[in-house]
Amino acid sequence: MKVCVFGAGAIGGHLAARLWRGGAEVSVVARGAHLSAIKADGMRIDAPDGSFTARMRATDNPVDLGPQDAVLVCVKSPALGSVAATIAPLLGADTPVVFVINGIPWWYFDQHGGALDGTRLDALDPGGAVRAAIGPARAIGGVVYSACTVTAPGMVLVEHSRNRLVLGELDGSLSARTAAIAAPLTAGGFTMEVSPDIRSAVWSKLMLNLATGPLSVLTTEPGRENLREPAVERAMRAIYDESAAVARALGCVPVFDVEASIAGARKSGHKSSILQDLELGRPMEVATIFDAALTLARLAQVETPTLDLVVALARVRAKAAGLFA
């Protein structure tokens, strides 16, 4: 199976290496020093289940790779426009595209059903570029849990063994194409789930992002430092409650253990993805993770006072850093 991972940062690099380890013919689209290192020495993974180096084709130009059996898009959401502009050479007639991206995806209301079916969230796909280049028929949802960091060009540190990817068709079907993508990842050591309810999976991850991301942006500290303050824990619990209420109002059933999440955060020194972006001066996923959640809250007519406040403050912080327009 030929699989291209478009965006080989921490998450994309980890997935690409697991696909390679599971027997897929893997290529990556990357850039800069990371690309040079992968070309020269492969992708080095240091993980609790062992360290290994995956050797794969790497380029910054999809034309070099040609049509694929599947593409995994693992860029941060601000880069989706550039993916839309360059992905065409990777797409055969039936090539599916898995979007492994944090936050509310651009396809959220496609094949959703109900009164909001077909609603377009323009801020998540400005000008409809992704829809035009890829479209919902190719799209597969992806929700990933993997705490990992690029420690040097071509090197990814995986912090724990609980690495999981949830795949799901927009219409809830259990398809052959999702099973085909899951197979080499499973063989490569990733825990895989193919879900008939990908939107609930989106909300299960988004609840974590919302409860930890804005607060970490404000404090620039990981959970174990933030949770030394009782008021921060109260705010986190309120955000979990508010975001779960939005999910339920939209017909989703997120699976989330608040107590386990808070207990884990108390011990975690891992910095959230959006905090890493702030510290590294990269465009921040404010629109897809923070603002889109509030847009859906308004569509669902659910009040979210705590989330409104912390998102507003995090938005100010991102704008002050010049990382969100």
Image (cartoon, rainbow, N blue to C red):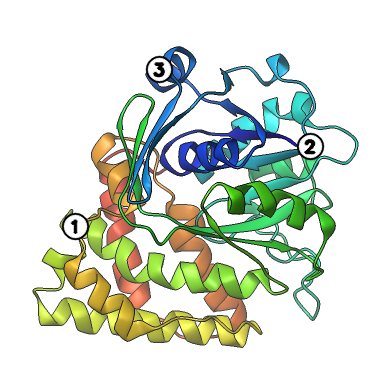
The quarter of the rendered structure image containing the C terminus is top left
Q: Which residue is mark 3?
A: 37
Query: Residue extending furthest right?
Result: 93
Classed neighbour count for the residue bearing mark 2: other residues with Cα under 10 Å, few (<14), some (14–19), many (≥20)? many
In the rendered image, the vertical position of residue 252 relative to residue 214, given as above or below = below
For the residue labelled by badge 3, is the local secondary structure a helix, a strand or a loop?
helix
Q: What residue is rendered at 69% in x and 14% in y?
A: 64
The answer, for residue 305, to whether it is visible in the render is no
Q: What residue is rendered at 39% in x and 26% in y?
A: 154
Q: Is residue 130 left or right of residue 311?
A: right
In the rendered image, the vertical position of residue 298 relative to residue 90, given as above or below = below
Q: Residue 215's x, y, as percent?
A: 25, 64
Q: Is residue 20 left or right of residue 33?
A: right
Classed neighbour count for the residue bearing mark 1: other residues with Cα under 10 Å, few (<14), some (14–19), many (≥20)? few
Q: CA distance from mark 2 to mark 1?
A: 38 Å
Q: Residue 105's x, y, as percent?
A: 61, 57
Q: CA distance from mark 3 to mark 1?
A: 27 Å
In the rendered image, the vertical position of residue 221 relative to residue 134, given as above or below = below
Quarter occupied by residue 145: bottom left
Q: Which residue is mark 1?
A: 269
Looking at the image, tell me whether mark 2 or mark 1 is earlier in sequence order. Answer: 2
Say which mark, if any, is on residue 12. none
Q: Are marks 2 and 1 in contact (CB under 8 Å)?
A: no
The answer, for residue 58, to whether it is visible in the render is yes
Inspect the image, locate mark 1, and give the three-letter code of the amino acid beneath it.
Gly
Q: What residue is rendered at 24% in x and 70% in y?
A: 265
Q: Are marks 3 and 2 in contact (CB under 8 Å)?
A: no
Q: Which residue is mark 2?
A: 69
For the residue labelled by badge 2, is the local secondary structure a helix, a strand or a loop?
loop
Inspect the image, locate mark 3, and give the three-letter code of the amino acid beneath it.
Ala
